[in-house]
Image (cartoon, helix red, strand yellow):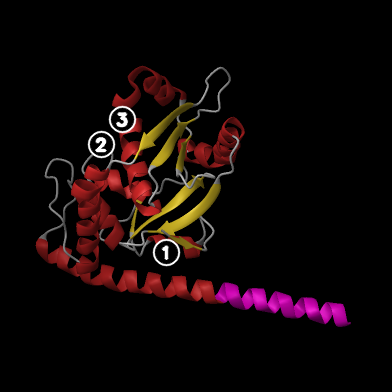
Amino acid sequence: MKLISLKQRTPAWEAWRSQGVTASEAPVILGRSPYKTLWRLWAERTGVVAPEDLSNKPCVQRGIALEDQVRRGFEDRHGTLLLRLCAESSEHPALRCSLDGLNDDGEPVELKVPTERTYRRLGRERERATAYRLAWVQLQFQLFVTEAPRGWLVFDPCLSGSPPLEFALARDEPFLTNALVPACLAFWDCITGGQAPESDRERDLDVLADAELAQWQDAARTYRALLEDRGQLDARLKSIKDRLAHAEAVFVRLM
């Protein structure tokens, strides 16, 4: 595992994520997501279609707002410290993840803040629940990147009388070797090569005509290159601002 010194949910972090495949994309890549197809993910990643804006969804906002509370709860229950980290696979650097937490044993901990309805379904269906099955793939991806033998899924609704549901999961080596890693690398090849994966004719109703798609692909390659340039410039600008702040502090001290 290679640790990346980035703060999550910043422009530099977004630029870094765009240069590889992330854990949250893994269920879609494997065709296990009921919410998005492989083609749609590719189209969003390459600029063919605009990505869905999830930032205004109440469930997303609630999850972000309560994540620290869920993290502290896990730390208190297990007597450990969870570090929020960004990491790349040592073997395949294009595979990368933003960890909600890495515990004292080097195990990734994926934190979820489910709605009350999803929480009740998890309580009834356990490993058969859609939320569990999607998060399981996500955690297996993290286990590959971190090279850990075990990880944790935590579903904490932060509701009175609703205790967190925790699952300690072992690394599934056959799944990683035979399914997840090859599929994610193939998807990355589709992105970097500008080659669209096969669309789902029932779910991908907005598939573009071939001629239009070629135009989109050309524009998308330019767009991705500019995003990468912007990420590098953002990082350089931050460094300059830090040096300016240091110089200004020296001026103040010497006045």
Residue 243 part of the magenta-drawn span? yes
Towards the viewer: 76 or 19: 76
Mark 2 and mark 3 in contact? Answer it, CB < 8 Å: yes
Q: Quadrant of the C terminus?
A: bottom right
| Mark 2 residue type | Pro
Q: Secondary structure at mark 1?
A: helix
Q: Is residue 47 in view from this perspective?
A: no
Per the rendering, the mark at residue 130 is 3
Towards the viewer: 52 or 81: 81
Is 81 positioned to the left or the right of 123 in the image? right
Q: How many marks?
A: 3
Q: Residue 21: x percent and y percent?
A: 32, 57
Towards the viewer: 88 or 206: 88
**Closer to viewer: mark 1 or mark 2:** 1
**Label 1: how many Cα within 10 Å (few below 14, some 14–19, many 20+):** some
Residue at the image point whose x is 37% and y is 42% from the top: 139
Residue 202 part of the magenta-drawn span? no
Q: Residue 162: x percent and y percent?
A: 52, 20
Q: Is residue 194 in view from this perspective?
A: yes
The span picked out in magenta is 237-255
Q: Is residue 117 shown above or below 88?
A: above
| Mark 3 residue type | Thr
Label 2 and label 3: CA atoms lie apart by 9 Å
- Find disc 1 in the rendering and name its residue: 16
Q: Earlier in the sequence, mark 1 or mark 2?
A: 1
Label 1 and label 2: CA atoms lie apart by 27 Å
- Find disc 2 in the rendering and name its residue: 34
Residue at the image point whose x is 47% and y is 44% from the top: 56
Is 196 positioned to the left or the right of 127 in the image? left
